[in-house]
Image (tube, rainbow, N blue to C red):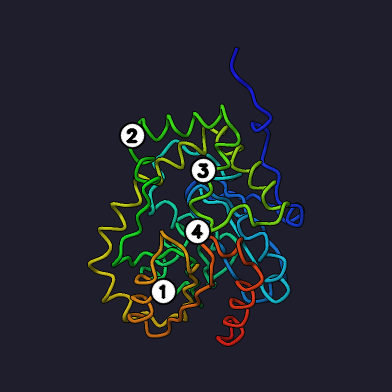
Amino acid sequence: MAKTSPYQQPMAPWDSLANLGKKTLLPKLNFSLFYFEAGDPGQPPLVMIHGLGDEADTWRHQIPLLAEDHHVIALDLPGFGRSDHLKQAYTPTLMKSAILELMDVLGLEKATLIGSSLGGILAHGIAAAHPERLSGLVLVDGALYQPDQMADSSLQVMAIPLVGEAIYTNFRKNPDAAYDSLRPVYQDLDSLPAADREFLFTRVNHRVWSNGQRRAYFSTLRKLSPWVRKAQSALPEQLAKLEIPTLVIRGEMDSLFSAKNAAAIQALQPDAEVLTIAGKGHLPQQEDPEVFNQGLMDWLKRKGL
């Protein structure tokens, strides 16, 4: 008999987002994306993009607050969370196309893109290729331009064919070990509020038990690095012409996205700023939402976005 787990049930959203979830078909790509939508559609739009092995709930402490003055869309990328799981390769090109088509379906000619980690890489890529679709850009511990290449030993191990899959699947035997796999992206996971820790424990174990998300994770991970490396040579010239207001938010203790990368973007892009959140790691939107939210909202207001 096949093993079963309570974590094979559908993912439940963060409580305050429960009534905001929607799913829509992308007719050109022929699959559906899940997203949270909040705020008045007449307000300036924000499109929020999560990182690798995450979902739209990563923005749980931002969505309700930002929705007071903005039209907020926070999506699950193809293959992740509650979006459709696909049989094709999860390439950066596919991901970018899905974000742009979702904007088209929702009638968003332009938006401020806010991306975390992988989401930042994709948002930066869209900005470089389709600047006319952006009114602003926020890169949270992730960007396409990486003179100091993002590197993590655990990700390098997970990228090894078969080895990564074996480690991932083995987490099904030990929910605590699955939860501990989150520690590298938080400066201090144990310091998060109890509600966040409980939510993350349940969420990571849902991912572990999803064969569709496992495939999306490894396909994305292995397609991403070659694409990022190939893009580097053309980026300085492209970014020097990019007049999109840009905010780079970096957790001071993040070991994945370096201060050198943040400074390089600021030096290249005509209208780029850096906000460093003291003492936090790769996911400052979760680790210090108060400081993150204030810095983001101040910047949006100052830039008229």
Q: Counting other residues with Cα less than 10 Å from the Cα at mark 2, is it few (<14), some (14-19), or many (20 or more)?
A: few
The Cα atoms of the two marked residues, 2 and 4, are separated by 28 Å
The residue lying furthest to the top in this view is 1
Q: Quadrant of the N terminus?
A: top right
Between 136 and 283, the one nearer to me in the picture: 283
Dot 2 amino acid type: Pro
Q: Which residue is mark 4?
A: 99
Circles 2, 4 touching at the beta carbon (< 8 Å): no
Where residue 214 appears, x then y in whole percent?
Answer: 48, 36
The mark that comes first in sequence, 2 or 3, is 2
Return the mark for residue 181.
3
20 lies left or right of 170? right
Q: Which residue is mark 1?
A: 131
N-terminal of the pair, mark 1 or mark 3, is 1
Q: Amino acid at mark 1?
A: Pro
Position above or below: 161 against 62: above
Query: At label 3, which amino acid type do we have?
Result: Ser
Q: Are marks 1 and 2 in contact (CB under 8 Å)?
A: no
Q: Earlier in the sequence, mark 1 or mark 4?
A: 4
Left or right, 100 with reference to 73: left
Please provide percent x and percent y for residue 45: 61, 72
- Residue 272 lies in quadrant: bottom left
- Quadrant the C terminus occupies: bottom right
Query: Rounded to the nearest whole Å, what is the CA distance between mark 1 and mark 2?
Result: 36 Å
**How many C-alpha atoms fall within 10 Å of the one at disc 4: few (<14), some, or many (≥20)?**
many
* Image height of 222 relative to 112, above or below: above
Sequence-earlier tag: 1 or 2: 1
Distance between mark 1 and mark 4 Cα atoms: 14 Å
Whichever of callouts 2 and 4 sits on the residue coming sooner in the sequence is: 4
Q: Which amino acid type is shown beneath numbered disc 4?
A: Ile
